[in-house]
Every structure is written in C-alpha cells, then in structure tokens.
Image (cartoon, rainbow, N blue to C red):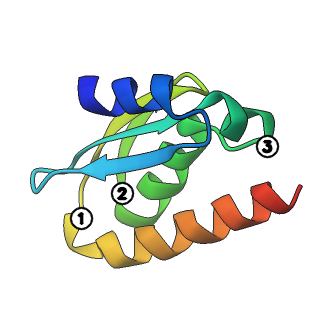
Amino acid sequence: RSYADAIRKTEPEAVIFLSDSDGFCVATSGATALKQGIQANQIIRLATEVAGGSGGGRPEMAQGRLKEVARFSEIQKRLEDYVRQQAKG
C-alpha cells in the first residue's frame, strides 16, 4: 500500500492496481487521473464484481480482498476498459 501511495504522489497520471496471491488488493489514482474521473474506489468495486470479495476507500486510494484471484486476467481487462473509457472523457 505504501509503495502504491508513493507512486501516486509522484506520478499524477498514475493509475495502479496491485493484488497479491492471497487476494489483498490496492488501487490508487494520481491527481491527473482523478480529474479524468478514474477513481481508486471504483477500480476496487469493479475488481470485486469480477472476482468476488469486498473493499472500498477514497477516490485516490482504496483497498480490498478478492475471493477468486485466479480471475485476475478478467479483472485486468475490465479495469483497462474502465480506464480507457474514463480517459476519453
């Protein structure tokens, strides 16, 4: 979490989603990404819709736990679509 937060603070365009093999996940959105509507709490919500679990947080930083970590490729696709859609604005 601290690593993702440090990147968010130094890279305003950064959008980060990290997950470990136990399903813990964290998402961050830099200031520029937030202005485009890319929110970390929305990223966690989308990930848990795909893989089950729960989570939440603020627009700039959120965390959660996934039930089905094997579905990471599906999560990745869904998040890529979300980021592209928001970036088009």
Disc number at residue 68? 1
Q: Give the amino acid type for the residue marked by disc 3 in the picture.
A: Gln
Kindly identify the residue that appears in the image at 56 percent across and 22 percent down.
Answer: 58
The N terminus, quarter of image: top left
Residue 72: x and y in percent read 31, 70
Q: Give the amino acid type for the residue marked by disc 2 in the picture.
A: Gly
Residue 62: x and y in percent read 44, 30
Which of the 4 image quarters holds residue 24? Answer: top left
Report the mark closest to the observer, 3 or 1: 3
Task: Give the vertical position of 9 relative to 68 (above or below).
Answer: above
Residue 44: x and y in percent read 47, 44
Disc number at residue 52? 2
| Pointers 3 and 1 in contact (C-beta within 8 Å) | no
| Pointers 1 and 2 in contact (C-beta within 8 Å) | yes
Gap between marks 2 and 3, in whole Å?
27 Å
Residue nearest the viewer, comparing 47 with 40: 40
Q: Which residue is mark 3?
A: 36
Which of the 4 image quarters holds residue 68? Answer: bottom left
Gap between marks 1 and 2, in whole Å?
6 Å
Q: Secondary structure at mark 2?
A: loop
Gap between marks 3 and 1, in whole Å?
29 Å
Q: Going from the N terminus, do you reach mark 3 or mark 1 first?
A: 3
Disc number at residue 29? none
Q: Is residue 30 visible?
A: yes
Q: Give the amino acid type for the residue marked by disc 1 in the picture.
A: Glu
